[in-house]
Amino acid sequence: MSGRTRLALCAAAATLAASCALLPLVSPASWILQAILMLAVQSGVGAVARRVPLARPLTVAAQALATLMLLTLVFARGQAFAGLFPGPEAFRHLAELLREGADDVGRYAIPAPQTDGIRLMLVGGVLVIGLIVDTLAVTFRSAAPAGLPLLAVYSVAAGLSDGGAGWWWFLIAAAGYLVLLLAEGRDRLSQWGRVFSGAPRAGGGEQGGATAPVRTGRRIGALALGIALVVPLALPAMQGGLLGGTGTGVGSGSGNGGTISAVNPLVSLRDSLNVDEDHTVITLRTDTSDTSNLYLRILSLDDFDGTTWKPSQRHIVSVPDPLPAPLGLDGGVKRTEITTTISAADSYVQDWLPMPYPPSAVRIKGSWRYEPVGMTLVGDHKQTTRGLTYEVKSLQVRPTAEQLATAPEPSAALRREYTKVPKSLPADVASTARRVTEGATNHYEQAVELQDWFALDGGFQYDTQVEAGSGPRAISRFLKDKRGFCVHYSFAMAAMARTLGIPARVAVGFAPGTLQSDGTVAVGLKDAHAWPELYFEGVGWTRFEPTPTRGSVPAYTQSDTPGTSLPEQTAPSQDASTAPSAAPSANQSCPPELRRLQECGGPSAQAGQVQGDGGPKWYAVLGWTLGGLLVLALPLSPLLWRRRMRAVRLGAHGRGEADAGPHILAVWQELGDTAWDFGILPDESQTPRRAAARIVRLGRLDEVAAASAHRLADAVEQVLYAPRPRPVAGLAEDVRRVAGGLRDTSSRRTRLRAALAPRSMARVVWAASARWNALGSRVSARVAARTTLRGPSEQQGSGDGAGASG
């Protein structure tokens, strides 16, 4: 098998190894078999084109054409000529499949079903990456840059799974890349001949020329992989690195903590609202007579980047019993505890548990974890809501308008966390918020003004056919068009509240369902809803309803006018109490997120308020700084090493007769390495005079540079054959003139490679290999010496023992 064929096989194998990281994203994973067959055809076309041989651009074009025909045959056979040759209709069909695939990626949770669109994206993406890797590593003989597209594949998989891509997929991808590098190194070394031949082993057997460097390459590769895995463990704020033992997210927690990063549920909310026929997905029975405020909350979105709202990465724990008191709620606010039994249909599959807010206790079967900040439950080990029946005890909190209006300012940490507004948010969002709330004297009045402007006074219309929108100007467009559904209203009001300094987030779940004749409440797909939650100290996270014709407007936001249709607030039940709970205090079991927000209550909360501002620690800054410098230094290390070696070889030594020989030989080696960097391989079988002539000929040097090269050769011959070498002046300048001549006759690409990735860096590999072999030889010699010294005494002791036994 030729070197290029072997390299092409390794390139395809590296692509497939990196593509394995995509396997957990789609079920079933049979698409990978199709990708393997098509990638084999693509690599075969490249091998044939290189054997003809075709020019490099033509080789790439032939592979790209073969890839397009393969995709047409599999995905657009009915729209193509003869089922193989794509035309305008086939291109339109492929574009439509890609669009459907993009929609499916946003619609489905992981693992997504293998639709035609998703399959085209996966198989087509693997083929495109395979073509790039093959082009770089095989056609242009540069395997190192091929790691970038391989890294892109793994990064896409890790990003779509929100960090859930296992470290073993990284190992598989890294192993494929290392195999590709070793294959390229072996192919190059096989062409360098005796220049790279290693010394024979002590046993006298002949050793192949590539064995020592390849062996060293394996060691270097293993060392690099180990560093890639271990360094993240040492750097601060990296959350354990690739081998961290913390929880890995939804469905794979260890039961001892971990983190979650939820998939945004808003991607399917619009589709649920636009179904032709409503379907009941949840049935509930409750012991309260007022179901108008019985919202079922799934999770909260508190990370606002100016484009959309999404859930933050949060720490999850085992489900406590009972659940802790909600953040910010004190004893002066009326509340009633109610019990609700909820049954999910078999067709309703959700990782997050719909519950009334705030929950105080949950009785449920299965594997569930608790997220303390949002007070939500999330399934663990692929646990979902399908067909589940569970019981939730929750509080109906009924603050008064006066309590909300006189609420004190929350802690600085909480304000900092929940009033962050990115710079990309258009200025008219904040200016509109100030205009609408002009005249309001406190945050409560501002919140009511915003709610009434959206729901009553602003001329907004509810329309589920409007696209959800994206980009930094999505909220600004909604404020101008005044048409949208709950996503638009909740996003806009929460963003505007933050610009006014009111802590805000968005909740996602279900609006109150429809009361049935048997006393149950049916919740359907069209009840899917999103609403803003604003924080008031002493009350906690408080629901507002800006979406017109949806849900119910909270009673605490209504003015005391006659004829209101809202139900009167009922008195708290006899069992409701404002006395302290017998459960452990908040500061004894407060999760890290609540400690960071300084809202754990009790003495610890007061102590936390006098601490620092929570900025990064000095060692974290130092670690990130050193890590950044290391990342910047690694690509420049060949350039720095080469400059250092040149300075040492051409330095000021060698002025006297004592060290004239070593100086001249060092300058000669620098000449050879400089020529090597510009693509002229060294040949130790030639005499210095012939080697200089070869450099002059292949480097197309002018007369001045050629004369300098020959003077260097004469100096080396004088060292080799003269009884006493004499110092020769100006040799360093001769090397610099030859280097300048090589630069003048080389292309820009060659000059860049000579500076940034010099070929003479192979001497580092040789030196490391020689030191390793020398170390092994010394260890073996010491072991052998100890064995030799110990042998006679042991034999004598054995003989004495035998004589005594006789």
Image: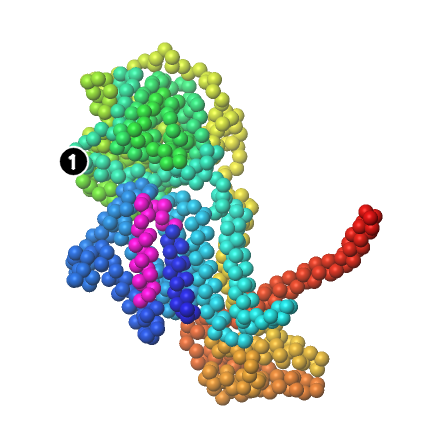
> What's under tag 1, amino acid-wise?
Asp
Give residue 500's position: percent from left, percent from top. Answer: 34, 36
Give residue 557's position: percent from left, percent from top. Answer: 28, 25
Q: Which residues are magenta?
A: 21-45
Residue that badge 1 annotates: 276
**Residue 571 visible here:** yes
Question: Residue drawn 37% across and 36% down?
Answer: 382
- Of residues 727 and 436, the one nearer the viewer is 727
- Of residues 223 and 595, the one nearer the viewer is 223
- Of residues 315 and 34, the one nearer the viewer is 34
Going by the image, does 246 lie left or right of 299? right
Give residue 229's position: percent from left, percent from top. Answer: 50, 50
Question: Residue drawn 36% across and 21% down?
Answer: 393
What secondary structure is the stretch in magenta mostly built from?
A: helix
Magenta residue check for 626: no
Going by the image, does 725 lie left or right of 105? right
- Of residues 514 and 114, the one nearer the viewer is 114
Going by the image, does 777 lie left or right of 114? right
